[in-house]
Image (cartoon, rainbow, N blue to C red):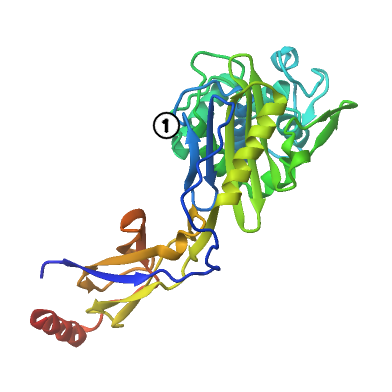
């Protein structure tokens, strides 16, 4: 029998209160920057952007990828936090911001991570790069491989520091993807390091250049960057309640401006948008009829938590349409695709998610299969 599609329409069940704000979508503020990008961390929905795919020089925002690759090396056991790394002449002599390591004194990996993230040390970046890959050039290859894995389509790295190079570039959107990936894949490292306001090494105390750590209690970290060509840049992440936003500001005129413009962008997102947990991972959404199996129905679910980020007031009007391939025939394994669920607002599709089987259903015995074959023929 040939498969056919059947549809089931139902209203999304709200898991949180209906929003109280109603009206037109408020446009984002006008920001004095070259490019910006704001998205919700949980849903991945874009809230606002400007020149999101324009290639820019990332400056020290590069060090978010340097940290990601280093965290991954530690996770795989290639490096340890309590391991000492030697300091090369190249690292010691590098220009730009430093943590002031000594070429005669090996440095703990944990100290280097603090120097990289809090003090934005170029010397720390190069030392970690050599420790992970043997050379900075080989480390840059790892950075580019990781960029491809994460889906950074307009990014290319030439070094671990962010010092200018014609072939060293990224975009606001790619930086948002990278920042979100680090928070998602290394949450404990993010929590431990990125909110630290100052760090002392070699008897020299340096503050974190992310001013929002002092100005906004909701901001718990990310990374600053600056070169003459790039201007003043800042990736920031802030959390209010269960909502987390990630913002990227590129090309501000000065340090103060990058902080205030980032704060304005984050405040806009929190004030006029809200992220709702629509379905939890493995929550049963509906049940489908299954034939030739040891059970007659199978629960459908999603493979991960699903959030929607919308202007306040819009979620109450969201509808969901479930489409499944019929007939469903056993055997079906848990996690196997069985259909899709489409979310619409005022008749326009806003999101689609794959529905998967919530459990496995084994094939029935001979007589059960024969009985269902007769049912299918008569349907």
Question: In x, y percent, where is residue 346?
Answer: 34, 58
Is residue 73 visible to us here?
no
In the displayed structure, 308 sits above or below 189; it is below
Question: In x, y percent, where is residue 320?
Answer: 35, 65
Task: Label 1, secondary structure: give it.
Answer: loop
In the displayed structure, 83 sits above or below 290; it is above
When asked about the image quadrant of residue 360, the answer is bottom left
Q: Quadrant of the C terminus?
A: bottom left
Q: Residue furthest front?
A: 23
Question: What residue is drawn where x is 11% and y is 84%?
Answer: 374
In the displayed structure, 366 sits above or below 64; it is below
Question: What residue is drawn where x is 54% and y is 14%?
Answer: 165
Question: In x, y percent, where is residue 351?
Answer: 37, 54
Q: How many marks?
A: 1
In the image: residue 10, left or right of residue 199: left
The foreground one among 92 and 41 is 41
Rate crowding at label 1 as few (under 14), some (14 to 19) or many (20 or more) other CA atoms within 10 Å: some
Is residue 203 visible to us here?
yes
The foreground one among 109 and 134 is 109
In the image: residue 245, left or right of residue 281: right
In the displayed structure, 196 sits above or below 369; it is above
Q: Residue furthest right?
A: 203
Question: What residue is drawn where x is 55% and y is 63%?
Answer: 20
Question: In x, y percent, where is residue 10?
Answer: 34, 72
Question: What residue is drawn where x is 90% and y is 26%?
Answer: 203
The foreground one among 53 and 198 is 53
Q: Quadrant of the N terminus?
A: bottom left
Disc 1: which residue:
153
């Amino acid at each position: 029998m040939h498969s056919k599609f059947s549809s089931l329409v139902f209203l999304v069940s709200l898991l949180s209160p209906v929003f109280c704000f109603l009206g037109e979508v408020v446009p984002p503020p006008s920001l004095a920057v070259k490019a910006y990008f704001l998205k919700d961390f949980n849903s991945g929905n874009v809230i606002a952007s400007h020149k999101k795919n324009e290639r820019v020089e990332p400056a020290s925002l590069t060090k978010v990828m340097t940290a990601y690759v280093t965290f991954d090396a530690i996770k795989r056991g290639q490096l340890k936090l309590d391991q000492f790394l030697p300091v090369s002449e190249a690292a010691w002599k590098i220009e730009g911001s430093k943590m002031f390591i000594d070429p005669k004194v090996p440095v703990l990996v944990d100290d280097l991570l603090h120097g990289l993230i809090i003090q934005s040390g170029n010397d720390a970046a190069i030392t970690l790069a050599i420790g992970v890959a043997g050379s900075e050039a080989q480390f840059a290859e790892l950075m580019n491989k990781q960029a491809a894995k994460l889906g950074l389509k307009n990014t290319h790295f030439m070094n671990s520091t962010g010092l200018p190079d014609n072939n060293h570039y990224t975009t606001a959107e790619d930086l948002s993807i990278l920042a979100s990936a680090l928070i998602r894949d290394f949450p404990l490292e993010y929590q431990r390091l990125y909110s630290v306001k100052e760090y002392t090494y070699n008897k020299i105390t340096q503050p974190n250049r992310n001013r929002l750590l002092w100005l906004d209690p909701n901001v718990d970290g990310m990374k600053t960057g600056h070169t003459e060509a790039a201007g003043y840049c800042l990736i920031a992440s802030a959390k209010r309640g269960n909502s987390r936003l990630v913002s990227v500001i590129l090309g501000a005129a000065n340090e103060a401006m990058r902080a205030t413009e980032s704060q304005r962008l984050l405040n806009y997102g929190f004030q006029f948008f809200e992220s709702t947990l629509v379905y939890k991972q493995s929550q049963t959404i509906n049940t489908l009829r299954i034939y030739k199996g040891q059970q007659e129905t199978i629960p459908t679910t999603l493979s991960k938590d699903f959030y929607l980020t919308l202007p306040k007031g819009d979620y109450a009007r969201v509808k969901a349409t479930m489409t499944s391939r019929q007939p469903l025939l056993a055997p079906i394994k848990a996690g196997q695709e069985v259909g899709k669920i489409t979310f619409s607002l005022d008749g326009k599709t806003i999101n689609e998610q794959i529905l998967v089987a919530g459990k496995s259903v084994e094939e029935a015995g001979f007589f059960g299969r024969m009985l269902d074959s007769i049912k299918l023929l008569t349907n």
